[in-house]
Image (spheres, rainbow, N blue to C red):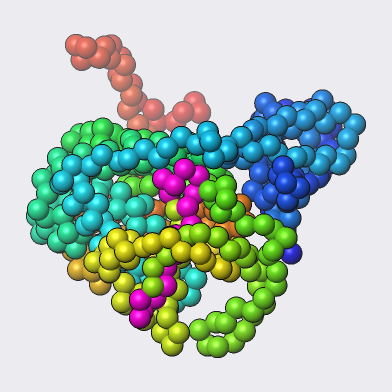
Amino acid sequence: MIILLTVVSIIGLQANEIDSLRVVSGVVFDQFNQLLPGVTVTVKGTGAGVSSDLSGKFSLKVPEGAILQFSFIGYETKEVAVGDQQIINVVMDDSITENVLTPAKHMDLSVKQSLMAKSGNNFAFKMFREISVVEVENTFFSPLSLNLIMGLLYNGASGNTRNQIGRSMGITDFEIAEINEFYQKILQILPATDPTTDLQIANSIWYHYQIPVKESFIYNGEVYFDAKVKALDFSDNDAAQLINAWCAEKTNGKINRIVDSPMPDDIGLYLLNALYFKSKWQIDKRFNKANTKLDYFTKADNQKKEVNLMEQTTNLQYYADEYLQCIELPYGNEAFSMSIVLPSEGMSVSQLIEHLDNDRWDKINNNMSQQRVWLKLPRFKLECDFSLKQPLINMGMDRMFYSGFANISDFPTSVSNIRQKTFVEVNEEGAEAAVVTIAEIVVALGTLRAPEPVRFFADRPFLFLIKENSSGVILFIGRIDDPSS
């Protein structure tokens, strides 16, 4: 069993409290006496906290008189006064039952917006195909996060660069206002579709204070993408810390670093999207931990490896054809679900990726039916960090890496790289995922570092004057040949 995290944060504690910290540990269970991973355990009134690991265990340092808060999506928050206790075992009560689930909110999209969503999915499958060529194993990618960054870039792009982006994303038939209103609606409605799911989406624009960024680009970023906009001195070490702190906050601490210090001299802007998702399986679709057992997983090279396979037999939406099998595991109130697609015997997952496109995906989803399914699924945790530059070039978007962003700045501007860092963990209770996508934008303004100061060494004879500034009248004038006299 792997202990996932025992990192302790002491942000928010005073110096005298830090001196008196002591370790408290324990195990968190659900109401069925099953171990409960992923529970946030914090010291009330501070930023100190950890998450319970796969074994439901937690350990953290607390000050005297501390009160621990235990919280997890779909469960009632529980508070426990530490007192003299060193071991605290907690049972969480599920606050969500089938009878009180709020029905999933339907996203009421216009015809144009539905077509935009379809274009986004089509772009997603094409991009994942290109990414899989570069990232051969264990790849986790967020199309929505990339789409939001590309939407921001599309607003800043001009000429042939904008045309390339539009063609590759399949959005050339849409007006810029329609595109922006679609992203605005997604950002407003998507997080509210399921109260049992914690979904947070955030955008930000960080630019070097010396860059004259166009007001129209800032306006569209703030109004349609709800972006935080901040001018920074990128030569200051605190700049990277501020951007990384934003990422940590928006991903619940899952992605804490996206830029390094010192920043490259030619970087003028960073466009960032952060997305955080955490939800529990629908109540009757959760896995019983007692049924999770070591079993063999056959890798692509036919090597067998022992892994923890979760297991249940239940009714699920199911589809199968000569290429694949697909099941759908619902979360919470079914606003969100996880689809698991298994290639047919004799077909590799790489071949399955080549086979899947948006039309086939629509066929799968439109032809699912409820079946009794004996399901085995491995627990897994995955972190990725990869560049999207080459996949985007392969998709036909090479110009943006050279020029074409006159709607961002009048100075020559181009994208130097687009990167994505992702995190996902799937276990018996549900899933947690996070992503940060960053577009690094170069502005040809010479060096963006503070210019070298002009050398003025008064180490030889000089003149000096005293004058009234508004009129220029000289009151005194003098000469120094030997300041030591």
Residue at 17% from the left image edge and 59% from the top image edge: 170
Which sits in the foreground, 47 or 53?
53
**Residue 219 visible at all:** yes
Q: Does residue 329 show up magenta in the picture?
A: yes
**Residue 257 visible at all:** no
Residue at 42% from the left image edge and 68% from the top image edge: 326
Q: Position of residue 37 (x, y in %)?
A: 67, 50
Q: Is residue 109 left or right of residue 142?
A: left
Residue at 20% from the left image edge and 46% from the top image edge: 113
Q: Position of residue 31 (x, y in %)?
A: 72, 42
Q: Is residue 179 left or right of residue 341?
A: left
Name the quadrant of the N terminus: bottom right
Q: Quadrant of residue 335?
A: top left
The magenta region covers: 321-336
Q: Does residue 331 show up magenta in the picture?
A: yes
Residue at 20% from the left image edge and 15% from the top image edge: 472
Q: Position of residue 219 (x, y in %)?
A: 23, 33
Q: Is residue 478 left or right of residue 81?
A: left
Q: Is residue 299 above or below residue 17?
A: below
Which sits in the foreground, 222 or 275?
275
Q: Is residue 3 left or right of residue 372?
A: right
Q: Quadrant of residue 171?
A: bottom left
Which sits in the foreground, 39 or 274?
39
Q: Position of residue 371 (x, y in %)?
A: 46, 64
